[in-house]
Image (cartoon, helix red, strand yellow):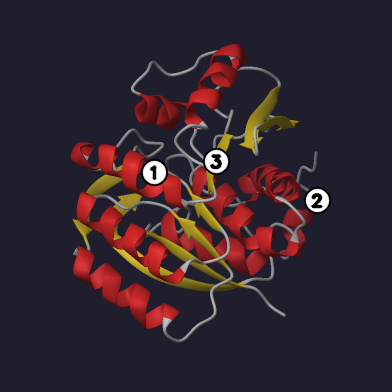
Amino acid sequence: MIVNALAIAGTDPSGGAGIQADLKTFAALGVYGTTVITAVVAQNTRGVAGIHPVPGDFVTAQLEALFDDVRIDAVKIGMLGTTEVIEAVAAALRRHRPPYVVLDPVMVASSGDVLLDPEAIATLRTTLLPLVDLATPNTAEAAVLLGEHQAVTAADAADQLGRLGRLCPGVLLTGGHLDGPQCVDLLLVDGRTTRIPAPRVPTRNTHGTGCTLSAAIAALRPGRPDWTSAVRDAKRYLTAALGAADDLDVGHGPGPVHHFHALWPQARARAVAP
């Protein structure tokens, strides 16, 4: 049976992040993708020019239309933007109880542009986080969720991981913003912490890495025995996509990862696998 996955997120006209990245990731991993749009975003590889939020009641209409008709095996949640949208998504999760839910708590774009209304952070923390199975913050997002300084060392990240675990059933704290030859993510599930390392790929083309990783985890989880297996395989996929990213020539800022590195022949030779 082919998995049906749902991405709930905003758009990215440049195709490297948001809904576009989620759909590419689903397709690359052999999963059928469905979507609910939370915001229309004017952005490119250099930054965000404007955000047009979708009203919460229309987000609800999209969700109900989809759940009324399509079996959803996994959900990936990305940019939500407003309290109204967060509450709409939380209500839908309570009603429909999809089997696996992954939240990428998108607050700030890699360009530095703010993507989550500050007033909505408390709602995300108290209303949505307890409903998802796995949250995938980077160190900057973890700091916002905890109201603390951003971790700058692996020890700082490990310390914050435990406090994040009180907010959400499962947490993957990604280590891409930390220094070192390896990118080490920390997975906390069922009280157990697992280190998930990968080579740090030397490329500037990292646009949409968080979106891609969380979408890959959601896509793979229905076919894996546990979260650790799904996260490890998703991390391998992202590392290879980063390794082939320089084959693309998209924009004048940090470009996207190569979602189809395993499918486009010219990318295979450059893909990096751990």
| Amino acid under disc 2 | Ala
Looking at the image, which residue is at 64% across and 31% down? 185
Q: Which mark is residue 106?
A: 1
Q: How many marks?
A: 3
Query: If you read the primary sequence from the N terminus, does the residue marked by circle 1 or circle 3 appear first?
Result: 1
Q: Is residue 8 left or right of residue 47?
A: right
Q: Nearer the viewer, mark 2 or mark 1?
A: 1
Q: Which residue is mark 2?
A: 269
User: Is residue 202 something that shows in the picture?
Assistant: no
Instruction: Kindly report the distance in space between the C-alpha atoms of the residues bearing marks 1 and 3.
Output: 19 Å
Q: Residue 219 appears in which quarter of the rendering?
A: bottom right
Q: Residues within 10 Å of mark 1 (few under 14, many from 20)?
A: many
* Above or below for 92 versus 52: below
State the image coordinates of residue 228 (x, y, percent, origin top left): 72, 44
Q: Which mark is residue 216?
A: none
Looking at the image, which residue is at 69% across and 44% down? 235
Q: Nearer the viewer, residue 59 or 46?
A: 59
The image quadrant where one finds the N terminus is bottom right
